[in-house]
Amino acid sequence: MTRNQRNRRWALALLMAATIAMQGCGQKPAEPPQATAQPASASQPPQEAFAPVTVQHKLGTTVVEHLPQRAAALDMNEVDFLDQLGVPVVGMPKDFVPHFLARYKDAPDIQDLGSIVQPNLERVHAVKPDLILITSLQANHYKELSEIAPTIHFDVDYRDSEVKHIEVIKDHLMTLGRIFGKEDLARQKAAELDAKVEEVRRMTRDRSEKALVVLHNNGAFSSFGVRSRYGFVFNALGVKPASPTVETGLHGQPISSEFIQQANPDILYVVDRTAVMERRPVMDAASMGNPLLRQTNAWKNGRVVFVDAEAWYVTAASPTSLKLVIDDVIKGYQH
């Protein structure tokens, strides 16, 4: 190889090396992949938007458009419904609070809204509720209450509970479950009621005893038949009535000597209204001086049950109170 040839090869090699070096300088070094920035809540499933709930009731139609945050309950049954679902209450009447809701009585963060039969509308307005729950006892205030917040009427019949009393309670429980996003818990509570009802029906199904439900009011007594506020005791719970009398009412039928003689119940359930209204201990056998009742088979055989007066008289249409009523009914068959 000549000297000139060697020089040309050397120059060519230098040119190629320079070209490669220049290409390398024009390229950016590879960067490690970086994670795409995500918002802090991206790993959590988004909350479902509240679907408006439309409720048909005896007083009209109520649409709940937002998840309620400030519920006012104007009836003790309604307070118990919310308590069972774990929903806080911002206001309620505090004149007759049953023992199973006693912790609400003096709670400073729960406003006293007056009386059960006559709620204080100014106080209701002042607590700024976004949902109001009522029964027939407050029905005459429905229009005014509806102007304050969406108001739902609980369609329980306090005068005649013969038909579908248990179903009405469960339906209302499920309605509130939908409104507050507590449907699973509502179904659980409804199933518990079904189990309790089946428990008492198993006991009453094949029994021949006949029972009478009476209300004590300052020494006087009234009876309740199959079409009364305690009609569900006979219809839904399977208790056989001692009287064929069919009457509808809140306070029953005054008892006469002839009525007692004809009824002569094997089991007697006594609801002491006086104990509730005057906040006194419930009467017992020693303090029950009515000679007509002492002549019944129930009295002679020791099958007189002085029931939980608050559960029977103040409520009787909520999950807790219904369970207490059933427990009292069962006692009449256990003697």
Image: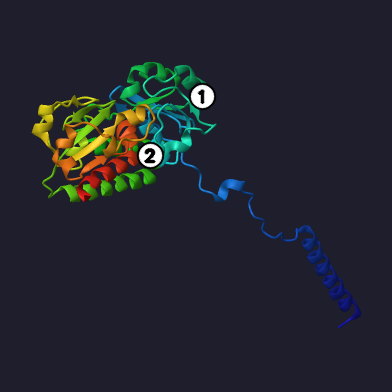
Mark with earlier residue (1, 2) = 1
Residue occupying the point 82% across, 69% down: 17
Distance between the Cα atoms at labels 1 and 2? 23 Å
Which one is nearer the viewer's eye here, 48 or 278?
278
The image's mark for residue 177 is 2
- Which residue does the numbered mark 1 point to in the structure image? 127
Residue occupying the point 78% across, 58% down: 26
Q: Measured from the top left, where is residue 120 in percent x and y?
A: 44, 19
Residue occupying the point 19% across, 30% down: 223
Q: Measured from the top left, where is residue 97 in percent x and y?
A: 41, 32
Q: Is residue 154 visible in this depiction of the protein? A: no
For label 1, the SS is loop
Q: Is residue 16 above or below residue 279?
A: below
Please tell me how many numbered marks the rendered image carries.
Answer: 2
Q: Is residue 36 above or below residue 299?
A: below
Within the image, what quadrant is residue 236 found in? top left
Q: Measured from the top left, where is residue 251 in percent x and y?
A: 24, 25
> Is residue 94 toward the left or the right of residue 220 in the image?
right
Within the image, what quadrant is residue 321 found in? top left
Which one is nearer the viewer's eye here, 45 or 193?
193
Q: Residue furthest right?
A: 3
Which one is nearer the viewer's eye here, 333 or 240?
333
Within the image, what quadrant is residue 178 found in? top left
Residue occupying the point 30% across, 47% down: 191
Q: Residues within 10 Å of mark 1 (few under 14, many from 20)?
A: some
Q: Residues within 10 Å of mark 2 (few under 14, many from 20)?
A: many
Q: Measured from the top left, where is residue 102 in percent x and y?
A: 44, 37
Q: Residue furthest bottom?
A: 1
Q: Is residue 177 visible in this depiction of the protein? A: yes
